[in-house]
Amino acid sequence: MKVFSRKKRLMGRTEVVIIQTTNEHETEQRETIFCSNCRMICDASLNFCGRCGQRLRSPKPALQTVPLAPSALLLHRSRRIPFAVMLGICILSVLFAFGAGLFAFTRTLEAHSASDSSQQTASVLKPEGTAWFYDTRGQDDSVEVHITALPRAAKGMVYVAWLVNPYRPDQVLMIGSFTPDRTGTVSLRSDQRVDFNPQVQSLRHIFSKVVVTLEKAEEQWQKPIGTPVVQGSLNISTLTTLTPIFVRSLYTPKQVALLMGLHTQTRAMARWLANMVEAQQHGDSANVRIDVLRLLYLLEGTHGVDVTHLNLAGQQNVASSGDGVGLLSATTPCKQDQHGCGYLDMVRAAVQTLMTQQLVPRPVAQKILTTLATMSQLAQRMQQISLPLATLSKLDTPTLRLLATLENQLDALLNGSDHNGDGNIDPIAGEAATAQLYTYVQQLGAIELR
């Protein structure tokens, strides 16, 4: 690139041309002049016209010229360089800010994802379970524990389940030790230990709290020392309402638990049913009649209307059956503290109280109430069938048919029946009965373990 600076003289004027080459450190200056003869622009340093040869001017001192410094170009470039630098810095800043924001956003998403994942994993792996009491020797003397999602115990450690008296924490009873399976699941029954509860205590009345701890495997466990893994207790209000169902009480007939009394009556029914069938096979009408009266006494109890009319309470061979409290109530309505109440109505009243006060899950209570209703209907039908048979003297065809109907009703009362033919005995009207009731009632006192 060349920069020209001209100084002209026309017709006696001179023109000075300063030429700057592309090299910033080299500057070339030239002076030109018009030829007065042919008007050609000529190099003044030659002092003659290159076209016509005429002398251009007389000899004079050379024109002193001031070279143009290269600062103009340098200034132009110096202005361009900072702008490019600043533009680059701005672009880099924007890119850096965008990248930093994207990185932070990504990390935030990853953190939230990790948090959600860990929370989900924690919720899946959180141990939980249920414990409930049951009867093995005629009363509420055993307990079963079921837990899921237990982590594997460290080497040299083992899980131990305990019953604890919440009002006297020093009063404990070890249920047993266990190791969960690969899925962290365990089911532990106290009757797996032959030395469990040797005094045959009604456990629910004493121990309403269950605790599972991690203990050293070599220790002789006397009480829980390790940190609880899961634990749970019965609500005091729930326990109070459940007490007459599961625990002997001064306020229940014969001072026995309602469930235990019901079990005693139905077990006696099963016994006399088998005896009646055997008597029929031998054509023994007298023993068949006695067995029918025994069933009627078990249904109505000492205070039953038909029992009183037939004076069954005065017949030793009849009154020795059961405990004198009937399945059905002698009076309607009745209360738990009245002698005329039957076991079915007393259990029903306790369950309805639990459901009304929302102390147990409504589906559990409703399942039991439906089963009790079925049992009551079957017992009433048996009562109606038994009355004509109370005076039987021979086993003729009509009598045998009536006995067969009574036996079928009693079998349905004891074992339940597949009323709808789907292959299952369900907690629906007409199906589940005594055998299923014992299982359902245990769910009333279930202790949630967390």
Image (cartoon, rainbow, N blue to C red):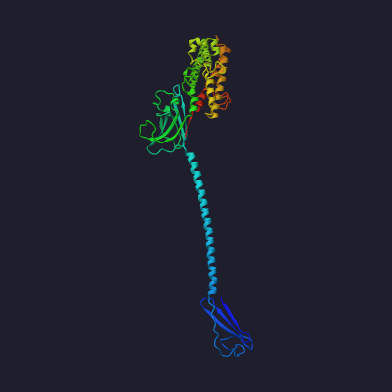
Residue 71 appears in view: yes
Where 365 sits versus 276, above or below? below
Say left or right for 175 vs 444.
left
Q: Position of residue 85 (x, y in %)?
A: 52, 65
Image quadrant assignment for residue 19: bottom right
Viewer-proximal residue among 402 and 322: 322
What is the tally of numbered marks visible in this picture?
0
Where 13 sits versus 122, above or below? below
Where 62 sits versus 183, above or below? below
Q: Position of residue 77 (x, y in %)?
A: 54, 70
Looking at the rendered image, the quarter that the N terminus falls into is: bottom right
The structure residue drawn at horizontal position 49% and vertical position 46%, both measured from the top left corner, is: 114
Where 171 sits versus 60, above or below? above
Viewer-proximal residue among 389 and 304: 304
Viewer-proximal residue among 11 and 258: 11
Q: Position of residue 147 (x, y in %)?
A: 46, 34
Q: Position of residue 89 (x, y in %)?
A: 52, 62
Residue 424 appears in view: no
